[in-house]
Image (cartoon, rainbow, N blue to C red):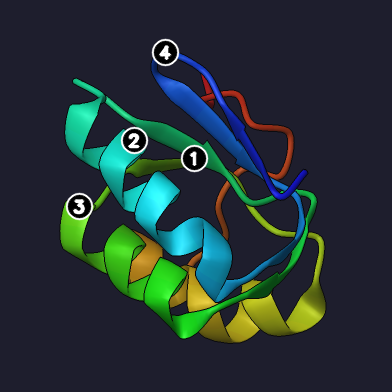
Amino acid sequence: MPLELHEETANLVGVVTVDEVEQLAGWLRAAKRPKVSLRRCNHLHTGALQALLLFKPKISSAPNDAFLAAQVLPLLTGSSGPVNKQGSDPP
């Protein structure tokens, strides 16, 4: 399943298609302080990317996928620096 949605955290897994965009956007809208892990995501539909750009959740784990890490992650984090790959905040 491409979306593993919990109360305040979501894991995007594998291929996130257009079919998951509405559910992801609804979750982002409802979560008070959403955190999204992209670690296991290897494809992100542009609609899902737009939802992430609109709601600006905290990205808790960088994607392992080289393209997403290099090209998409900087758009979501607003920086060119890497996000912690383990998903935990630095001390």
Which residue has dot 3 on it? 55
Dot 1 and dot 3 residues touching (CB under 8 Å): no
Residue 87: x %, y % from top left: 64, 31
Q: Position of residue 72 (x, y in %)?
A: 51, 78
Left or right of residue 2: residue 82: left
Residue 58 point in image, percent of width and height? 36, 40
**Which residue is under mark 2?**
27
Residue 10 place in picture, x, y as percent? 53, 33
Q: CA distance from mark 2 to mark 3?
A: 10 Å
Rounded to the nearest angstrom, the CA distance separating label 1 from label 4 is 11 Å
Spatial separation of the CA atoms under disc 3 and disc 4: 16 Å
Up-down relation of residue 6 to residue 2 (above or below): above
Q: Nearer the viewer, mark 2 or mark 3?
A: 2
| Mark 3 crowdedness (10 Å alpha carbons): few <14, some 14-19, many ≥20 | few
Q: Quadrant of residue 42?
A: bottom right
Q: CA distance from mark 2 to mark 4?
A: 9 Å
Helix, strand or loop at mark 4: loop
Tell me the amino acid under the disc marked 3: Phe
Q: Are marks 2 and 3 in contact (CB under 8 Å)?
A: no
- Which is nearer the eye, 29 or 41? 29
Task: Choose the circle earlier in sequence order: 3 or 4.
Answer: 4
Q: Please tell me which residue lies in front, 10 or 83.
A: 10
Q: Which mark is residue 36?
A: 1
Kind of residue sitting beneath label 4: Glu
Q: Which mark is residue 7?
A: 4
Label 4 Cα neighbours within 10 Å, binned few <14 / some 14-19 / many ≥20: few
Residue found at x 18% / y 63%: 54
